[in-house]
Image (spheres, helix red, strand yellow):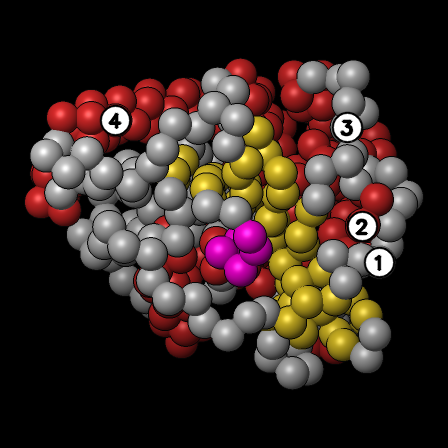
């Protein structure tokens, strides 16, 4: 997706990093391609795994390249230290690809496999989550410094949800690691995180691409990296819980389609085939992020050049005719193949609750 743009050189951008578990590792490749192309990221907005990747990039020393930051993360995710945590995330057979899809129904199939193999039904009923927080805490201790969120080298906004009030929460201050833990607390999988009278969890299961939050900040250019899988056809919903989760999946997809309209440049790495726990294939996932970003940037540059040429030759010389702009949108195509996109930026809803 490409909306009306200007030349990006020297222009500040807000980079939105969506949630998606291991698929979010693709954000490293997206960021590297953006930097290589001359984009300047002045703020990152992330949820769930997008917040984690954003934190790694936002705390990387200025003298380190994006490639060095991603290699550091890959080395840890492939290490023996992380292996036990990968197995906990994936259940008894984490890498066999047995799940029927990469969406919520595939997640449910994998969850029930985990439940059966670990006799975890009692945990589902009696405990706040299937897993304790040690999996996330261990990764945070390895990858992210113990600093305040306001001290990152690149400003970072972390999006979560307050389970008590139902409000979207945007964290800008407070312990960085704890803020990330809150944003990555997948409901039912990891326990929610107490924070100033709230109980925070992962909003990414509903709002996986927080572009509306990005639109509430000053700045014209919003770039979004969307790693969520596409909607897949399913042959059946054999149980009540399958039907309920299928509706959640449909709702997330419809919400994401709306959220995509806030982005001027939408990048969608083809990573839907990877399971949310499949961190063992990080190199491949990052490569797909890099490729998707390069393709999107090429379309962006073509659109910018076409608009600049048209503006220079138009009779008024000060604006692009709407009809011609729409024709170029049709010609360039839509990266997400959505049938409900528009060329205008929808009005933002009420400002999210921020904790600064």
What stretch of residues is rendered in magenta? Answer: 214-218
Measured from the top left, where is residue 181 in percent x and y? 76, 55
Q: Secondary structure at mark 4?
A: helix
Which residue is denoted by mark 3 in the rendering?
60
Which residue is denoted by mark 4 in the rendering?
308
Q: Secondary structure at mark 3?
A: loop
Which sits earlier in the primary sequence, circle 2 or circle 1?
2
Q: Residue at x 69, y 47 (%)?
A: 156
Q: Is residue 337 visible?
A: yes
Q: Quadrant of the C terminus?
A: bottom right
How far, Cα to Cα, is label 4 from label 2? 39 Å
Measured from the top left, where is residue 217 in percent x and y? 57, 55
Q: Secondary structure at mark 1?
A: loop
How far, Cα to Cα, is label 1 from label 4? 44 Å
Dominant secondary structure of the magenta stretch?
loop
Given contact means CB atoms under 8 Å apart, are the residues at marks 2 and 1 in contact?
A: yes
Which sits earlier in the primary sequence, circle 2 or circle 3?
3
Which sits earlier in the primary sequence, circle 4 or circle 3?
3
Of labels 1 and 4, the one closer to you: 4
Which sits earlier in the primary sequence, circle 1 or circle 3?
3
Of labels 4 and 3, the one closer to you: 4
Which residue is denoted by mark 1 in the rendering?
174
Given contact means CB atoms under 8 Å apart, are the residues at marks 4 and 3 in contact?
A: no
How far, Cα to Cα, is label 1 from label 3? 19 Å
Which residue is denoted by mark 2 in the rendering?
149
């Amino acid at each position: 997706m490409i909306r009306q743009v200007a030349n990006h050189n020297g222009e500040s951008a807000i980079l939105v990093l969506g949630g998606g578990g291991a698929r979010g590792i693709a954000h490293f490749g997206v960021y590297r391609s953006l930097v290589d192309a001359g984009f300047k990221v002045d703020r990152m907005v992330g949820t769930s795994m997008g917040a984690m990747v954003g934190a790694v990039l936002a705390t990387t020393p200025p003298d380190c390249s994006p490639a060095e930051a991603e290699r550091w993360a890959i080395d840890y995710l492939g290490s023996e230290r992380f292996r036990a945590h990968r197995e906990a995330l994936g259940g008894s057979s984490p890498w066999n690809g047995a799940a029927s899809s990469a969406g919520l129904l595939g997640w449910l199939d994998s969850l029930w496999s985990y439940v059966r193999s670990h006799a975890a039904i009692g945990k589902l009923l009696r405990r706040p989550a299937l897993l304790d927080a040690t999996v996330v805490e261990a990764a945070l201790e390895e990858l992210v410094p113990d600093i305040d969120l306001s001290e990152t080298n690149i400003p970072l906004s972390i999006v979560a949800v307050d389970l008590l009030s139902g409000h979207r929460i945007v964290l800008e201050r407070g312990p960085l690691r704890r803020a990330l833990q809150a944003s990555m607390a997948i409901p039912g999988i990891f326990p929610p995180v107490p924070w100033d009278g709230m109980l925070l969890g992962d909003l990414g299961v509903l709002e996986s691409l927080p572009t509306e939050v990005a639109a509430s900040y000053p700045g014209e250019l919003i770039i979004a990296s969307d790693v969520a899988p596409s909607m897949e056809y399913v042959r059946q919903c054999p149980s009540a819980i399958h039907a309920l989760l299928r509706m959640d999946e449909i709702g997330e997809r419809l919400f994401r389609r709306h959220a995509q309209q806030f982005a001027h440049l939408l990048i969608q790495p083809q990573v839907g085939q990877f399971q949310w726990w499949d961190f063992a294939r990080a190199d491949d996932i990052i490569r797909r992020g890099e490729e998707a970003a390069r393709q999107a940037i090429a379309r962006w540059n073509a659109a910018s050049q076409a608009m600049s040429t048209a503006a220079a030759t138009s009779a008024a010389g000060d604006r692009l005719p709407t009809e011609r702009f729409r024709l170029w949108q049709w010609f360039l195509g839509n990266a997400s193949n959505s049938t409900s996109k528009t060329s205008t930026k929808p009005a933002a809803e009420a400002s999210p609750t921020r904790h600064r």
